[in-house]
Image (spheres, rainbow, N blue to C red):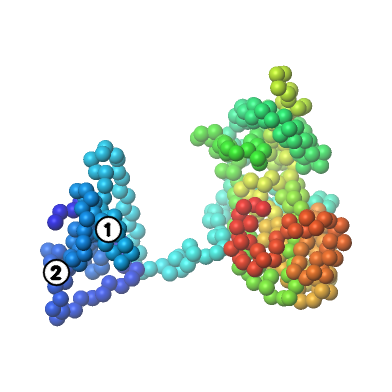
């Protein structure tokens, strides 16, 4: 029987041991018929399902559908086997990759199956540690560059082209255009962004593309062949609290508590020396249909921006440093908070209502010292939930926006909520 086969030095690693044949066996073993030379231990011949039916001798009925296509009866029902479409002119590609290893690496296997996020592997010499320092009631950070920022591609013209494209799309809906303009103005009013000063002849800058979250398309954010800001920044090592440990601690005590930090990334300032690499363009006034575009204005972000590759480590590092710098009198509550934050979400539990109230008041005061406002407090305890509502003076709908406890009881749903960015 002829079949087309791919010949490779080693078909696969023998993760599962191959049974040794008993020489005294009277069975008509296929291995003694196929092999014409001394066998190499392990799997020597692998016949795919597209050809197996040619060798099947189980007396079950076969229905020939085409030259290399048959219907075979199995205990699941009739199945179509073989291959179809040869000679139709389509191109085919076969890729064989052989990685030699003496033994099956069980540690690597379970690392791939782990629930957490593996640490990002970055050469230590290439990573500049983020310099975190406090100015007044807010922390300021320097960006962790792994490649020289002076080597960033000049993308000023590309950013202007993207602004023109964005303006054309927003002009199709005046309400969305006005809403987007109001959002930019709010960034400027609150100090999250500022008017960008003029650049000197030798000064470098990078212009960040931006778009509304309700856009249905997803445009590329960098020119072909040109490095982006994220290419030059290091994501750092993984400092996220282990998600499994967070959920286990959440189940430790009777009263569960959740909250989150309001606009967490935007509460951290970017050092003055790095702000020119967070520049962006927008119009000085609202554009309108049928009139020339308004003058283009140049701004820059003053706070850490969501979407930049190093933003998560900057947030996590800032929270941890802030908690470590607190008065020793608050050591117990700070230690609890250090193990209860997952990015900007607080997930923890306490034994009594008194402990819950202490956690609530102390943690709000401590985190406010870094301009982090803990909000959307929720609990499985009805009395505590009522106190949250009265103290924060928020509506029932806003409280219900926080993570529900039925979700927290399933780690998978909590994980989905996180990766979807709420």
The outermost residue toward the bottom is 24
Residue 412, given in percent of the width and then of the height, sits at 59, 63
Q: Residues within 10 Å of mark 2 (few under 14, many from 20)?
A: few
Q: Which residue is painted at 84% across and 61% down in the image?
A: 389
Labelled pair 1, 2 in contact (Cβ < 8 Å)? no
To which quarter of the image does residue 413 belong?
A: bottom right
Residue 377, given in percent of the width and then of the height, sits at 78, 61
Q: Which residue is mark 2?
A: 32
In this rendering, the count of numbered labels is 2
Residue 367, given in percent of the width and then of the height, sits at 80, 59
Q: CA distance from mark 1 to mark 2?
A: 22 Å
Picture quarter with the N terminus: bottom left
Q: Which residue is painted at 64% across and 68% down in the image?
A: 409
Q: Which residue is mark 1?
A: 49
Q: Which residue is painted at 54% across and 54% down in the image?
A: 122
State the residue in front, 357 or 173. 173
The outermost residue toward the top is 291
To which quarter of the image does residue 40 belong?
A: bottom left
State the residue in front, 346 or 125. 346
């Amino acid at each position: 029987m002829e079949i087309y086969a791919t010949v490779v030095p080693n078909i696969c690693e023998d993760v599962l041991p191959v049974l040794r044949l008993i020489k005294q066996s009277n069975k008509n073993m296929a291995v003694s018929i196929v092999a014409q030379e001394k066998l190499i231990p392990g799997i020597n011949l692998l016949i795919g399902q597209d050809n197996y039916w040619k060798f099947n001798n189980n007396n079950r009925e076969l229905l020939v559908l085409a030259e290399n296509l048959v219907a075979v009866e199995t205990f699941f029902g009739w199945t179509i086997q073989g291959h179809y479409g040869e000679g139709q002119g389509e191109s085919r590609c076969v890729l064989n990759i052989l990685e030699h290893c003496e033994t099956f690496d069980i540690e690597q296997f379970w690392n791939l199956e782990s629930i957490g996020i593996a640490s990002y592997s970055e050469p230590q010499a290439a990573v500049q540690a983020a310099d975190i320092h406090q100015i007044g009631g807010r922390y300021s950070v320097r960006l962790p560059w792994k490649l020289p920022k002076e080597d960033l591609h000049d993308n000023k013209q590309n950013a202007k082209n993207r602004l023109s494209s964005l303006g054309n799309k927003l002009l199709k809906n005046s309400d969305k255009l006005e809403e987007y303009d109001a959002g930019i103005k709010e960034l400027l009013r609150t100090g999250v962004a500022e008017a960008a000063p003029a650049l000197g002849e030798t000064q470098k800058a990078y212009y960040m593309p931006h778009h509304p979250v309700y856009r249905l398309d997803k445009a590329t954010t960098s020119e072909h062949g040109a490095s982006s800001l994220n290419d030059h920044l290091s994501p750092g090592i993984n400092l996220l609290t282990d998600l499994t440990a967070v959920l286990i601690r959440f189940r430790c005590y009777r009263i569960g508590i959740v909250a989150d930090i309001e606009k967490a990334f935007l509460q951290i300032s970017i050092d003055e020396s790095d702000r020119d690499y967070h520049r962006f363009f927008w119009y000085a006034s609202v554009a309108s249909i049928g009139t020339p575009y308004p003058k283009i204005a140049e701004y820059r972000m003053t706070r850490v921006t969501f979407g930049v590759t190093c933003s998560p480590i900057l947030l996590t590092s800032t929270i941890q440093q802030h908690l470590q710098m607190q008065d020793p009198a608050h050591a117990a509550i700070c230690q609890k908070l250090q193990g209860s934050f997952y990015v900007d979400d607080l997930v923890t539990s306490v034994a009594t209502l008194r402990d819950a109230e202490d956690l609530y008041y102390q943690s709000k005061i401590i985190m406010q010292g870094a301009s982090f406002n803990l909000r959307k407090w929720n609990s499985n305890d009805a009395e505590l939930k009522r106190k949250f509502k009265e103290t924060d003076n928020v509506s029932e709908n806003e409280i219900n926006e926080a993570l529900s406890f039925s979700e927290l009881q399933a780690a998978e749903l909590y994980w989905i909520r996180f990766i979807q960015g709420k």
